Image (cartoon, rainbow, N blue to C red):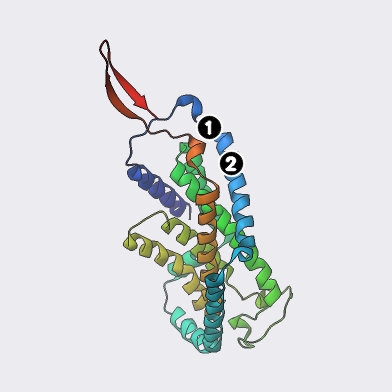
Amino acid sequence: MLRLFFSFAVFLYGCAELAAQDSTAVATDSVPTRWEMLKYDGLSVVGGVVNAYTAPLRWEKDDWLGFGGVAIGTGILWATDESTSDYFINQGHGAPEWLKDTGFYFGKPLYNYGITGGVYAVGLITKNEKIRKTGVLLISSATAAGVLQTVLKSAVGRARPTTGVGASSFKPFNGEEAYHSFPSGHAILSFTTAYAISKQFKSPWVKGGIWAVGAITPVSRLWAGAHWLSDVTMGVVLSVATVECIEKYLNHERNYDPVVAKKKISWNLNFTSRTIGVVGVF
């Protein structure tokens, strides 16, 4: 998992450097310290989480229609949960153990936050705005979605497939892990990370590849009989909705350009009757 983290960090840093197409100059006295960046980013994380939780208060007609569509789709999947669970469990018997382990650990909070926190640390240390913002998006999205799934698991109290009592057995606010099936926390953390990272790229092939990595965890949970299909599907939907909501907040409410005080300077020759000079406009 450490190698996975470093691969993500180096990969993102390299892409951020290649993406810097414009020639820019930054005034030395205008560059904030890392402590100032950390404080700003910390407020951005808190603001992103709060914004995600209050988003329904700002929903419009199309948003509510989308919510209704998700509810109907979840209900349809719910009706097929037992048959699809049997299918995935049977498929899991032949799945490679390394793939199962990768899926399991990628969705564990300890390892997942190691990756997300590591990405942010690279951005902070190198003062790379693109990676810093990606780290903020990762941390705030994982926190918002992670806390929400913890509450939902307890409130819904759905039995896991391994209990053998069926997909429609519930014990709300039950402390037993066996009744914390809906939604899948592993699926939420893994796909939140993958989806947030994929937002930094334009190529559909790159996005698809990152999504495929993020999908390993949801599928591995189905193989293990730890969740029903509707559990992991709802986890993925919550991941996408959370990342989209927080990214919109960061883009509109937390503009990172002023933080780094990046100033683009255009140089022009200036001719007068007595002088010839170069003027920088910024």
Check the image and report above or below for 126 versus 70. above
**Does 158 sit left or right of 245 as displayed?**
right
Q: CA distance from mark 2 to mark 1?
A: 10 Å
Badge 2 or badge 1: first in the primary sequence: 1
Asked whether the beta carbons under mark 2 and mark 1 sit within 8 Å of each other, the answer is yes
Q: Residue at x 36, y 45 (%)?
A: 14
Query: Disc count in the image?
Result: 2
Name the mark on residue 32: 1
Q: Nearer the viewer, residue 221 or 33?
A: 33
Residue 80 as seen in the image, left or right of residue 175: left
When asked about the image quadrant of residue 151, the answer is: bottom right
For residue 161, what is the image quadrant? bottom right
Toward the viewer: 69 or 112? 69
The label on residue 278 is: none
x, y percent for residue 256: 50, 43
Q: Vertically, is 57 above or below 271?
A: below
* Between 228 and 94, the one nearer to me in the picture: 228
Can residue 78 be seen from the camera position used here? Answer: yes
Residue annotated with mark 2: 40
